[in-house]
Amino acid sequence: MPTAPDDLPLADKDSEVARLVAAEDTRQRETIRLIASENYASRAVLEATGSSLTNKYAEGYPRKRYYEGMEVIDPLEELAIERAKQLFGAEHANVQPYSGSPANLATLLALCEPGDTILGLSLPAGGHLTHGWKVSATGIYYKAVQYGVRRDDHRIDLDQVRDLAREHRPKLIWCGHSAYPRTLDFAAFAAIAREVGAYLAADIAHIAGLVAGGVHPDPVPHCDVVTSTTHKTLRGPRGGLILCRKEHARAIDRAVFPGLQGGPHNHVTAAKAVAFGEALRPSFRAYAQAVVDNARALGKALAERGYDLVTGGTDNHLLLVDLTSTGISGRTAAKALDACAIEANGNAIPFDPRKPFDPSGLRLGLAALTSRGLGTGEMTRVAQLIDRVIRHAAERDGGVEPAFRDTVRAEVRELLAPFPAPGLGTP
Ligand code: DSN
């Protein structure tokens, strides 16, 4: 097929970018990836994301667009919508949000007026910026009240949620988190929201794959709106999603476009459709269960090595490790681990005496390793490696000796070798 002038493959056209992309492929192949919000998208998802659909503008919704040339885009977006509705049993789905934060802002734009009171889990307790944290637009344009977790067991304090809801009469209550290792009681949140006449919105960005796979309680029957990203446990492309009751469909759609966004990212919509299709397969239920099993196994193996787990363990895909007793911070530990090809992030723990940039905790998520096929048998080895690096760094004021680093990196490569990274192949 003749090609357009100057239409060269990336490697020939721009070797500098090509080199960096290839280096990131290698890094992801050769790293134990434990960042709880990350995963490996499948080859099919990556292909759809890299398609000609990126060239098309499509402001509006299927059959109601502001541009022509929609004979492919319309059925594609309808397919993504139908699959999302089927996957989550939702009455309405909007697949256009660029990511989770815009999905949350669109929810507020749809259901609240600026200045209305909203109630959400605070960031230091494991919540998300967009649930009303003070530096986020959601904390600037809305009167945000924040609930936390109990001091004794670090679980969400539903009594406090109820008390704050009664006192402040919020227009909307958020449930959901970015760093909370336990399941959410959506029915209890719904009872509180009903009592005070608030809308209930669940942000399931982290746990969407677990909900879809049937291993986490289902928010959809209890909530007015459910928002999500599509790239975490759901294993799709980097993007967002809003599910809602039929009565909110028009408001949500108008909030996303024209309220907040311009043209949808059609290449990402296609990849979302692929991911929803993948998650509708029976094998995805096994994947979701394996994620939780792996998180529990890694938690057990770390606890056996003396690590303190926030709430004592996990019910979902993530662990929050309190490193106070090791003498190094979560950030120092994350940097030492990163040097050794083990990727995680420093994270605040509840009532953290340290600053958010250099917190006491380490957040570990199992979605990505599980996508490679590692199972509970490998989690002991992963815990051993983490423990060795943290002890090494703690004894050296955070430092990592080059010979030690190279030894661990080689062990990581050896551990990962039998488990090809989806979309990227073997080390
Ligand atoms: N940045 C995501 C996370 O790591 O949890 C949330 O937006």
Image: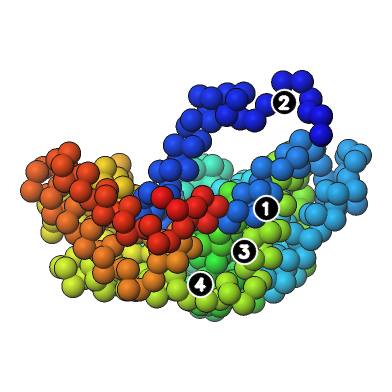
Q: What residue does disc 2 label?
A: 7
- Let me know if residue 12 appears in the view: yes
**In this rendering, the label closer to the viewer, 2 or 4:** 2
**In this rendering, the label closer to the viewer, 2 or 1:** 2
Q: What amino acid type should be assigned to the residue bearing mark 1?
A: Ala
Picture disc at residue 66: none
Are circles 4 and 3 on residues that touch, CB within 8 Å?
A: no
Say whether mark 1 is within 8 Å of ligand 1: no
- Residue at the image point whose x is 30% and y is 42% from the top: 357
Q: What amino acid type should be assigned to the residue bearing mark 3?
A: Val
Q: Could you say whether the residue bearing mark 1 is in a helix, strand or loop? A: helix
Mark 2 or mark 4: which comes first in sequence?
A: 2
Picture disc at residue 226: 3
Mark 2 or mark 1: which comes first in sequence?
A: 2
Q: Could you say whether the residue bearing mark 4 is in a helix, strand or loop? A: helix
Mark 3 or mark 1: which comes first in sequence?
A: 3
Q: Which residue lies most toward the top here?
A: 5
Give 92 or 121, whichever is nearer the viewer: 92
Mark 4 or mark 1: which comes first in sequence?
A: 1
**How busy is the neighbourhood of tag 3: few (under 14 within 10 Å), some, or many (20 plus)?**
many
Q: What residue does disc 1 label?
A: 271
- Residue at the image point whose x is 69% and y is 65% from the top: 277
